[in-house]
Image (tube, rainbow, N blue to C red):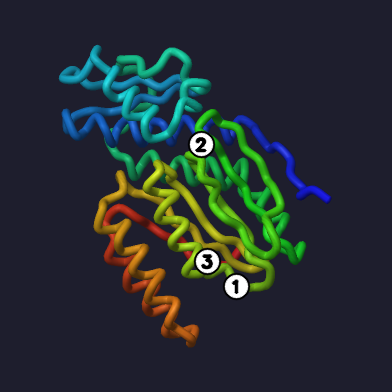
Amino acid sequence: MGYEQWEVTCEASRRVALLGVAFHVLGDAVEEDEESTVCLGSSYGLTLCSPRICPDTGWIERLLTYTLGKAWLELLPDGIVCGCAGSCTGSTEQIMRELIRTYERGLESHILSKTLTGKEYFLAVGWNGMAAVAEGESREVHVPGVPLVVFMHTHPGGVCLPSSRDLESFAEFFSRGGLLAGVYSANCRFLLWLRQPLRVEDYDRLIMLAQKLKKVREYYDYMRELESELDKSSSIGYILELV
């Protein structure tokens, strides 16, 4: 018997992917020109505003393809266009906050609806804007080994806190260009997201935190370690709250 799965691609998933591409374009561009901004149209347009870089955006496109694969070209077949029109920002954190709001409005309900099933499900958004929900393997979900913008999964029961395995998977997810990951239960959610391009020390922090939590047995010790380490991160933000 096969696992349950279905596509949930929509305008919100395509917008989330576009915002994700904008995050990486800006992150790469400011390394060369701190005054760079990206400008997003009301639909699916994206332009780079950077007199020092434009019109030579080929190197950014090659970096995107190296990190994210070719799927982003399905969303932006014309590649990275130069221009300074539309709603422009020079902040990756601002882009991410809009990405999270878009996800919450248009996609979050799909994973919330699966928190009472007693099974583990995941929701994934690809770099071409396609989104899907699927049943995980027996009480365990692994982050797929393909580049994704968003990856969420459920924990049966009332605990949305990430396991050590979850944190290790999230570290790898972020290292492959992912931007928003999390865990949902029937009564709470835990989200990790990038404020800026992932810093090596924050990748290491997640891995070391996972190792620490394997030795923790008490809830309060777990929370102290989790919050203490994540609060030190400059490139990773987190949300832990009731739903």
Identity, as a three-letter code, of the amino acid under mark 2:
Val
Looking at the rendered structure, the kind of residue marked 3 is: Glu
Mark 3 closeness class: few <14, some 14–19, many ≥20 residues within 10 Å:
few
Taking the image as shown, residue 86 lies to the left or right of residue 103, namely left
Task: Tell me which amino acid carries mark 1.
Answer: Val
Circle 1 sits on which residue? 159
Q: Which residue is mark 2?
A: 16
Mark 1 or mark 3, which is nearer the start of the sequence? Answer: 1
Dot 2 or dot 3: first in sequence order is 2
Residue in the foreground of this view, choosing between 167 and 240 = 167
Distance from disc 3 to disc 1, alpha carbons, whole Å, reads: 11 Å
Q: Is residue 116 above or below residue 130?
A: below
Q: Is residue 140 above or below residue 126?
A: below
Q: Residue at x 47, y 69 (%)?
A: 164
Element under disc 3: strand
Label located before the other in sequence (1 or 2): 2
Q: Residues within 10 Å of mark 1 (few under 14, many from 20)?
A: some
User: Residue 99, image x and y in percent?
Assistant: 47, 41
Residue at 33%, 24% in the rendered image: 62
User: At 38% across and 26% down in the image, what residue appears?
Assistant: 87
